[in-house]
Amino acid sequence: MDACSLLSERKGATGQFKALSEVTDVEDISLAGKTISGWLKELDVIAAEVKAELISREIGCHLLEVLEAVNVVLFDSRGFRRFPVLVDSKFSYLHTVLSYGCGSAIMFSIIYIEVCRRLGVTVVGSRVGEDFLIWPQSGNLVELFRSASGHSLFATINGRCVKDPRSKASELDSGSLLRLDIATNRDIIGIALANLIRLHWKRASKANHGLMLTSPLRPVHPGKDKANMGETSLPLLRPQELRLAIMASERLLILQPDNWTLRRDHGLLLYYSRRYVEAVQELSICMAFAPEEEAEILEPFVEKLHLLRLLSSWECLDQADSVPVS
């Protein structure tokens, strides 16, 4: 999108911008020097390294031995680290996690699940509080919690949260794992996208400490607010980060079209991006799904957006009239 905008503004722009603008297939897009297929093949490479590790140790394919070999390759050979706290959006994208060896809990879990799948081992996961935990689908989970050298296999796979008394993960045992709801692929994608929305919004609003998505929904006083409509100003946000948050939100809405809180947040992201027409549309749909008390909060704000949309269109007309015709 940025490349095409530059080309439209500067017709003489060439080089990599021209090459990027000609990409029509997602598979042709280069991410840090590789295509999407190229990065997925990295998972095959990791699985092959695990097989080599198993052969070198002359051990069979017992479940725990396979998992230990996966841990050796990921943690020891490749130096992977799992961040319990979301700190940077780049650690929430597959290609950067595979490049740097550092990733969010959900992205590391995806890599672990996919590597094990290539080895014929089914690994499942579930959200527990703020953490996402994974374990092999097995009838004997007791072995996962047996401590060896001060660490259980379950703790090695899932990181520090398992030993953190403030985390719900620290309360789990082999019996409680069986009672957890297994996350589907749709659930896992949803968690990853929700993390991206939070991270990109946090970076977009960095210069506005404490700004929340829902901040504009404070009580609106019709007379005063409409009188000062022309003076309405939005906080200064980083446009690229805001756009990335909107893109993640759009994809999450595909998975959860009836989630009214998600649609509300998407509408507010559009509002911050000054895309008032789309914001009105999304928030109007949201009001149809939202509880009555929430719809009452949204209604005056949507009315305000209607006026902002009109003001925006008038400003465009004024600018067009002021351009001299040669």
Image (tube, rainbow, N blue to C red):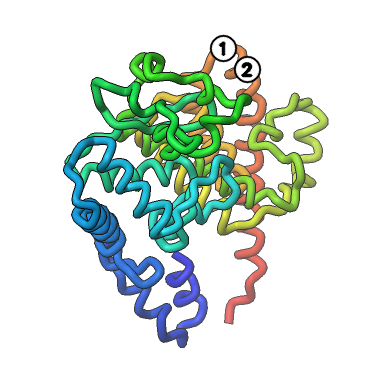
Q: For mark 2, does the 10 Å Cα neighbourhood hold few (<14), some (14 to 19), or many (20 or more) residues?
A: few
Figure check: 308 above or below 28: above
Q: Name the residue that disc number 1 marks.
A: 292
Residue 277 in view (yes/no): no
Helix, strand or loop at label 2? It is helix
User: Please, what is the three-letter code of the amino acid marked with disc 2?
Assistant: Glu
| Nearer to us in this view, 223 or 43 | 43
Q: Position of residue 119 (x, y in %)?
A: 20, 45
| Residue at position x 41%, y 32% in the image | 154
Figure check: 292 above or below 275: above
| Nearer to us in this view, 203 or 109 | 109
Q: Position of residue 151 (x, y in %)?
A: 47, 35
| Residue at position x 17%, y 43% in the image | 60
Determine whether, in the image, residue 166 is placed left or right of residue 258.
right
Marking on residue 296: 2
Quarter of the picture holding the C terminus: bottom right
Residue 54 in view (yes/no): yes
Figure check: 128 above or below 278: above
Q: CA distance from mark 2 to mark 1?
A: 6 Å
Q: Position of residue 85 (x, y in %)?
A: 58, 41
